[in-house]
Amino acid sequence: MRVLGARARVVAALAVAGVLLVQLGGCAGQPIQGRARGVGDIDAGTAAGIPVNNDGPTGPKKGAADATLQVENADGGEMDRLAVNALSDIYAYWSERMPADFDGQRFEPIKRLASYDSKGKAIKLCGQSTADLVNAFYCNADDSVAWDRGVLLPMLDKQFGPMSVVAVLAHEMGHAVQFRLGAKSGITQTTPTIIKEQQADCYAGGFFRWVAEGKAEHFDVNTGKGLNHVLATMFFIRDPAGLSASKQGAHGLAFDRVFAFQAGFSEGPTRCARMNQDEINTRIAEKERGETEMENSRNGDVEFDNEKVQDLLKASLDEAFKRTGANPPAITYNGANCKKGNSTPPVSFCPDSNTVAIDPDAMEKIATPPKRGQEPGVDGAGIGDFAAFAEIASRYSLSIQKAVGVSLEGDKTGLRTACLTGAWAKFTDLAGTSNQSKLRLAVGDLDEAVAELLQDNSLIAADINGKQVPSGFARVEAFRIGYFEGDKGCANQFS
């Protein structure tokens, strides 16, 4: 987050006949319909209708025979075997779905598959040298898919597991598919990059649903932690903060990329083909910014233990929810234990005293951005300031929910809490200026929210007892409803 002079958007929060209504800014443009947004079809225990199963297998299937595809420059090692098996399953998926979803059109395999080591002997692919090219890519010029077996694939495998490698290759194959479909996917040589990238993420999501349904020969993915790790990969490979979606080469922030993946997972390839500039403009989180705003945004992490920042956080939450008529809770930084009732460290809502109690040291760890190459929230790594603030906002929202008489226990409470946290995030958006200091959403903050939501111990989508919504997929959907739809989404869906 960042501190700057800004005037808050209009906020309205009403309790009507016991139904919580919270409006924290409006949704730009028209609502995006579809299951990936979760409107009218979100279940705390499923990922778009597939029951969450944390105990199911995730990764390469034991005993599955390795696929045989012709690959240039391959070394036959573990990473190449992983890539070839992934591509074989992706081929099988598109051989099934392309004719079924796109008027009988047959899927044609890739003309050229190539493996290389970015730190080894360089070769030439798509008109460029592979020296220090830590990447995986599709090249339309020669219809090729290539990957760096030396650095990129091992790094992904180490950080997120083998299914992250499958996800990256499914994305690159998504590009091959969209060019094969051409007009059916709205793609030409001049199509803006962000459309191509959002579609490719979406097509990858469609493939992963097929895997989750047990149809792949070489891989499994469970819809609990397995799918969460795939979604977390989007945080690792997102655009850098401050890169506008309108710029050539933009892929989107993790918040945007996760949406596209979820859209494909929920609704399949035909949903992906409908992604165009008008649709993307209504929901993309990253916008064009002036130079001053860009510089402020790049330096968006603030000091969590700064008293001024803590005061601004309290003021932001109070203002966001003031028209509920609820008595705002106190926020203390003397530990996360409640004198009565359950505590949920590192931050708790204590209903008897109407207090949000915080363990400052634990929250400071969450607020510290991860170092380069670290997976957010893993092995002691932090996530960023907004992840910490969102945890606090989620417990604050429980005070508002208590005041208007809704339950504070159960999965619906967890989803409602995530939704209201997303609505508060929208309130802290970058719009408006004044001389009054405010706490404002910075570029990349929504990505931190996604990363925190996918943690196994996150409170953003948890009830008063800390019971987390089982489906990470549903957690992210609920947060997004609040961010884009405010009171409409939170009230209609979770009250």
Image: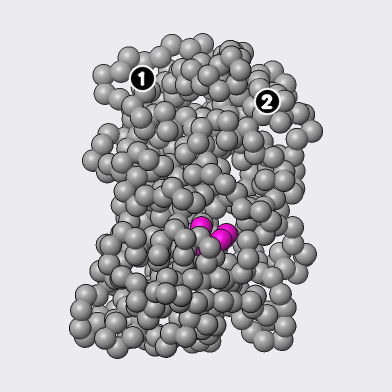
Horizontal arrangement in the rendering, residue 421 relative to residue 362 (left or right): right
| Residue shown at the point (43%, 11%) measured from the top left | 68
Question: Would you place residue 57 above or below residue 355 in this image?
Answer: above
| Residue shown at the point (48%, 17%) measured from the top left | 96
Horizontal arrangement in the rendering, residue 419 relative to residue 413 (left or right): right
| Residue shown at the point (72%, 78%) measured from the top left | 433
| Magenta range | 481-485
Magenta residue check for 483: yes
Q: Residues within 10 Å of mark 1 (few under 14, many from 20)?
A: some
Q: Secondary structure at mark 1?
A: loop
The prevailing secondary structure element of the residues shown in magenta is helix
Q: Which residue is mark 1?
A: 217
Magenta residue check for 46: no
Select label 2 or label 1 by which is in front: 2
- Please say which color scheme the image uses: one colour
Q: Which mark is residue 418?
A: none
Residue 23: x %, y % from top left: 55, 70
| Residue shown at the point (69%, 18%) measured from the top left | 142
Q: Which quadrant is the N terminus positioned in? A: bottom right
Callout 1, which amino acid?
Glu
Q: Which quadrant is the C terminus positioned in? A: bottom left
Depth check: give the residue in front, 43 or 60: 43
